[in-house]
Structure formats: C-alpha cells, structure tokens
Image (cartoon, rainbow, N blue to C red):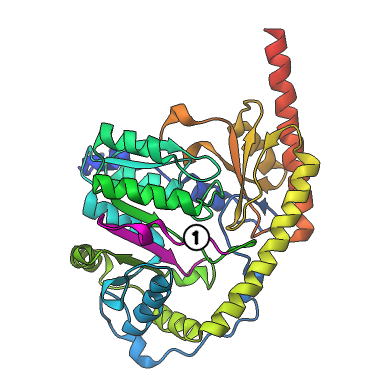
Amino acid sequence: MKTPTAPSPRLASRIDKLTGSVARDILSRTQDKEIISFAGGLPDASLWRDLKLPEVPPSAFQYGPSEGERSLREILARRSKGLGLPANADTTLITSGSQQGLDLAAKLILEPGTPIILEAPSYLAAIQVFKLFQADLHSLPLDSEGICPRALDRLLNETQAPVIYLNPTFQNPSGTSYSLERRKQIAAVLDKHATLLLEDDPYRDIAYDAPPPPPIASFLQTSPWIYLASVSKTLIPGLRLGSLTCSPELFSPLLKLKQAADLHSNRPAQFIATQMLADPAVNQARIDGLCQHYRQKRDLMQTLLAAHFSGLASWEVPSGGMFFWLRFTQRIDLAQALNDTLSRGVAFMPGAPFFADPEDVGTSMRLNFSLVSPERMEEGIRILAAVVRDLHQTAACAESAS
C-alpha cells in the first residue's frame, strides 16, 4: 500500500526570496581541521585559549529585561558617546550579535519594494536580510575613500530611498575605510534628503595604522540613524552579543521588535561581557594585543600575496579589519576555483555574493587573515595562487583558440 504524500505547507511568499549564506555554507564544508580556511570572518581562537571567564551570578539565570542589562548598556553607550554619537543607555539595545540588529532594523523600515541603498560590494548577510524583506536594492561602487557623495545625491533623487546601509570602517568585504571628509559629505547628503542611516561598525577597534574617523552617524544633524556594534570581533564571538544605538524616536519600536523576536539576549553572556569590559584600561590593553597579533598576520599575508599573486590580481593593504579583497585581472570561474582549492585543502570566499546587482560583479575574492596560523598561511596562499594561475592559463588558451 502506498504511503500518502503529505501536502506541502503554505509558506509566506517572502520565503521565495530567502537565500542561503554562501559563507556559512563554505564554513560547514570546512569543519575539518585540516582545511586551511580563508573563507570566514573568524577571530583567532588562540587569543582566548587560556582565557578564564568571570563567574556568573545565579541571578543571571532568570529572565531579564528585553533591552539588556543596564550595566552593559551603560558601558556600550559610553563607548558610542566617546565616538561622537548622542548616545545613552536609554537608547542602547543589547542584541544577539549585530546581525540581529540588521534584522530588527529591516523589520522596522522595509516593506516589499522599499528602496534601500548599499555599497558595492556589501556585507553579504545584510544583502540576505534585505532580500528576505523584498526590498528594492540599489548599489553604489566604492572607491578608496568610500561611496561618492554626488552619486549618492543623484541616486536619492532618483529612488527616494528612505534608508541607506553602510559599513564605512574597515568594510566587509573590501577593507575600505571612509575618509573623514567623505563621512562628513555623506552625512550632509543624508541630512538633505532626511534619509535614515543604518551604520554597521563591527571592526572599528581592529585598527592597525591609526584610529579610524568617527562614525558617519556622528556628523548627522537632522536625519535619523541606527548604529550597530559588536563584541564578537574583540571579545568572544560565541557570546553572540551586539548593540544597537539609535535616534530616540526609533528606540521604542525597535525594543518592541526585540521583545517579539527573542524576549532578551543571553543573560549569562551579558554578565560575562560586562565584567570583561568594566575596566577601560584593561579592555584597551587586550585590544592593543589583539591588534598587534592581527597586524603581524596582515603583514604576512601582504608579503605572500605580493610573492604569489603579482600579475594575477590587484588589492589594497587593509588598515584594519580582517580581510583582503582581491580583484582579478582576468575573468575566471571562481566556483571551479573553489572546488579545486577545497580538494587541495584550502577555502576562500568568492566575491559574487557580496554584490546585490549581478551587473556589478567582476571577478573578485575575499581572503580572511585573522584565523589561519602563520605556519599554514604560506601553504594556503601558494595552493590558492597555483589554482588561480592554472585557471588563468586555461581561460587564455580558450580565448586564443576562439
């Protein structure tokens, strides 16, 4: 007797717009410790190998306030205020990573067809969220100082977009850090159009050459803003804690959205973070050590790229963050390259998922330098370059044959 087929459930129409995360898919394929992974944006686990976590009081095991622990909000609000933002604990929300901040902001602002402006390239998980909410995505290319203010002004006139999403400090994936003048110019354009700024700033503390300029939101005079930060890159990523600071009029609806999402973020994690961040001098010393550690890895990858990728790609040395962004001189099949490098024990992130508009996509690659040990980095870059060089030669032969 045949088993009856269960009817397909009726799902929300937006699920058709739901895309998977290429980065998470690659990470799931690279759980094998033998893989040399340049794919994810993972901190170096050796930095907390001997870390002793603070004790968590039993009171942390009970339900807590949706906005987060007051003591942690005060610490993070002081940090935001020190960056020039008009922030306080009453406009600061603890989130389950800055990724939840993106989700809450999207729920607040976006409806099907709502225009939103973002960078090209842009953070792929943000693109994933915006597409889920069926926004109308418009991209502006990055140069060495950020997006062009005049181009932004024109695009806002054309689209009347109510919101722009920017990651202006050690941008993921490009590593670009907007200049001070460019930040001021962009803020002036946003004020002119009364456009809401959604500013994502998880890499600010990981600076190698000089402190970055203040957030764009700090230069706004009238436009509303939402500023996202995270402790994942400088504390412990597994705590999954971020913060959202915003214009006062936006806080109440965002808090209600947080309540509807998960009641509150992990309380034991908040107590741990509060104690680890409580002493500014101790925290700064830890960040300084982290930056020194990552600077050495950045410099090593730059040396290796110069040795193995010269003539194959161009790139800028990032002044902070965790990534190199390579732009290839010739189009190659990066899906094939990824399969080839994975078969040889190396992973990377193809550039295409970082673009909202397929017409903007060239041939590019993001390489993370924070995770892999110096001992294995040279082997991984050598294998990666060998695969790319073979594909370049194959493409050149095919072109000459045609």
Reply above or below: 331 against 7: above
Image coordinates for residue 350, horizontal then vertical, percent: 57, 39
Specify whether 178 is left or right of 92: right
Image coordinates for residue 27, horizontal then vertical, percent: 55, 52
Residue at 28% of width from left, 50% of height from top? 191
Toward which corner of the image does residue 308 lie, by quadrant?
Answer: top right
Q: Which residue is mark 1?
A: 213
Toward which corner of the image does residue 119 lie, by quadrant?
Answer: top left
Reply above or below: 360 against 272: above
Kindly tell me whether residue 104 is visible in this rendering: no
Specify whether 154 is left or right of 350: left
Specify whether 274 is left or right of 295: left
Q: Nearer the viewer, residue 250 or 266?
A: 250
224 inside magenta stretch: yes
Which quarter shows the N terminus? Answer: top left
Q: Nearer the viewer, residue 296 or 352?
A: 296
Classify mark 1: residues with Cα within 10 Å, few (<14), some (14-19) or many (20+).
Answer: some
Q: Nearer the viewer, residue 305 or 198?
A: 198
- Magenta region, residue range: 211-232
Residue at 38% of width from left, 73% of height from top? 81
Going by the numbered disc 1, the residue's amino acid type is Pro
Kindly tell me whether residue 16 is visible in this rendering: yes
